[in-house]
Structures are given as structure tokens and as C-alpha cells.
Amino acid sequence: MAALLPPLRVCRGILKELRAMQGPTYKLSPAYNYVMDQFRKNKVTGQMYCRAQQEAHHDSHTYLCLLASNRTHLALHKLYHGKGDRSREEVAGLVGLRLPTQPGGKGWEK
Amino acid sequence: MFRGIARLQSQFGNILSPNKVRSPHFRFALKYSTAITERKRFYQDVSISQGEGGLYEINLDRKKLKTPGGKLFTVPNEVLAIAVATEWDAQRDTLKFYTMHLTTLCNTALDNPTQRNKEQMINAALKFLETDTVCYRVDEPHGLVELQKNEWDPVLHWIENRYNVTIGSSSSILGPEIPEATKDTFRQHLNSYNFWSLTGLEFVITQLKSVVLSMGMIDRHLSVEQAVLLSRLEEEYQIQHWGNVEWAHDYDMYELRARTAAGALFVHLSSENSTVKRKLLQDREG
């Protein structure tokens, strides 16, 4: 039932995500080195049904899902999530006023 | 806005100054409950280094990363350290803690703010089995009944065969009767996981609202996307019927996918150990 993408597509997907996250220097990051290392190591196996290879394939798929859905979630968050309240200075600035300042601080402030 | 929070924190700090001795539990709860969601990025480089005991640490510029509880942030293997470092490196102008799922899981495992032990976590997981999503069926509408039968039954059969247990499904309000033998089998299986893996597993179960789907994903029978789809089966059915609302449905789905993927990765990385065995090529004569 584990209908996973072929390893090449997963590898390219992970590299695309890393590039989107880090910009052009993504090839220097430890994550890039580790991912390429693992994909190369698990490419060739002497056995017909290699459990380590299957496990690595599933793990790479999971990591790709993590990176891709994190990026999409962040994009949706930026698009739709509430921005929160404005600060007191900004609210005053909306009507063209500024907050009063008291050089010694107010009575209850340190 | 951050200045307001900082002022609040400094006021809190004054209250906690050494006149009263607070228990570690109280301090933990305080740190974890007054959590800030965003902070400005204060470092340039992220790197990992190996400390004492073979544990890996994360360095932000020159400083070592610490957990919210004040402990040094250490992970047992290099892969997890690389993944956490990638999370920290991926942050741009502000640190968005709600996207750093692996870091959050490591912090929970290291600090253990609610002071759970393995037995409590296993009992909680088994208790959840009684209210497992996959076992709760509806009687109507007919389309949903069919969908649940076609999608959830195979997973139930798989887990019943894999662990040699009976779980069954029910459409009554009380849910299925889980026999003691089933619980014992699962208890024995879950005992083989270490504390970190159990932390991750508990997180995944809470997200997917199902022990069956979590075990299916951890045992690599289901992919993350499939597990999330099965967990949200009724929602997907209603979406197909009434339409999709991007700012609610998609937002929830991608957040669920990210968290579940992080949990699954956390469990796998905490429980695996790999060795490299080199096969020697035979020398040919002549």
C-alpha cells in the first residue's frame, strides 16, 4: 500500500526544497551532503528485497513530505493568518498622533 | 509588541528572583507556557559539533543551542542533528517556532516538562486505542460508510495480521471492545521503543488521532500523505461534497502533514542504528 514515488523524484524533490530554503549556497550545507551520500549508498544493493533500502526510501519520502508541507504551510500562514494587533505607536500614528514621552519614565516604570 | 513581551518577561523575572525557591517543575511550566511564537534571527551560521558522550550539539554562531528548560541541546545521532540544524538555518528574518517541529520534539524529549515516563506513555497510547478513529464508523450517509469500509478496513486487516491481534470496528457510541490480549501484545511491542521514540510516537498518535494509522506509518506500511488522508477521511468526504476552503482545509492539512512527517522522522531516527559492512571482492587467480 506504500505507493511511493521513485527514488530519483524524491531526491530531486528534496534538493529543490533545500534550494528553496537556503538559496544558491544549498550545496554547501551538511543536509545536502548527507542526502546525496545516502542516496548514493543505497542505490546499489546485492539483495532482491533489501529492507534497508526500502526503509531509506520511506524515510526520504517522509523528509520530502516534511520540507514540502512546511513550506506550503508557511506560505498559507503568511497569506491567510491574522497579523495580530498593531502596537500602541502604530495605532496613534493611524490618526496622526504620537505617544507622549516622559523623560524620567512614568511613575510605575523602572 | 516584542518590547511589551520582553517587559512582561523581565517583570516575571523579578518575581522569580531568589527570594522564593521555585521547584523545577514550576519553572518548566512557566517557560513552556509563556512561549513566544516568533523572534528575530540573531545568528548567521548554524553548525553541528560532537560533544561528550558522542552526543551532537547545535551551534548558532559561537553559542551552543539550549532547550527552553535551560539544558544543553543534545541529540543522540548525527542525522537528527543535521535535520535540526537545517530547520534553524531555514529561518529567515524571524524565527518561526511553529514550523520547527523537529526542534520542538527534541526539546520535549530532553526537558520532559510534564515528567512522563515510558510506562505512562505506553498506557496513554493503549488507552487511545479504545477511541481510535479507524475503529469508529458511522451509520449514515451511505457514501461515507462505503468510503470508511473501503479505506479503513484494509489498514485494520493489515495491523491485525501484522501483530496477530483483534481490534475490530464498531458504529456504536461506546466503540470497539479491545481484548486484553491485544493490549498486552501492543504493550510488549511498544516497550521495545526507547524514550525518545515513544515521545515521537505519542506526538504522531495525538496528531493523527489514531493508534492504528500511527503504527501503520511507523512500520512503513503507509506513507505520510496516505496516513494523513486516512485520518481526515470524513473531512475529505465533506470537502468533495461541499467544496474546499483553502484557508481552513488546506492550512490544516499541510500543518498536519508537516507535524506527522516530523514525528515519523523523529521516531525512525531515534530508534535506528546503522552499521556499514563492506563486502570484500574475491581475488581472482591468474
Image (cartoon, grey):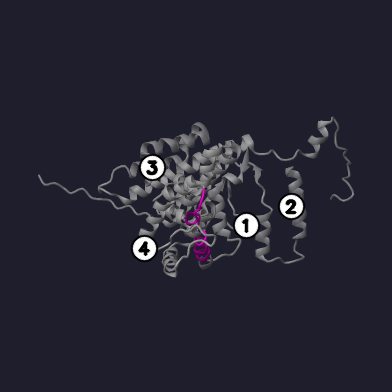
Q: Could you say whether the residue bearing mark 3 is in a helix, strand or loop?
A: loop
Q: Residue at x 41, y 42 (%)?
A: A35
Residue identified by numbered label 2: B9
Query: Callout 3, which amino acid?
Result: Leu
Q: Residue at x 45, y 46 (%)?
A: B147
- Asked whether residue A19 appears in the rendered view, the answer is yes
Q: Nearer the viewer, mark 2 or mark 1?
A: 2
Distance CA(mark 4)–CA(mark 3): 26 Å
In the picture, the disc for residue B70 is 1
Image-quadrant location for residue B42:
top right
Structural crowding at the residue carrying mark 4, measured as other residues with C-alpha within 10 Å and reported as few (<14), some (14–19) or many (≥20)? few
Q: Could you say whether the residue bearing mark 4 is in a helix, strand or loop?
A: loop
Tag 1 subunit: B
Residue B236, position as x, y percentages in the image: 51, 43
Along the line of sight, the residue nearer the viewer: B89 or B170:
B170
Residue identified by numbered label 4: B164
Query: Callout 2, which amino acid?
Result: Gln
Q: Which residues are magenta?
A: B121-140
The dominant secondary structure in magenta is helix
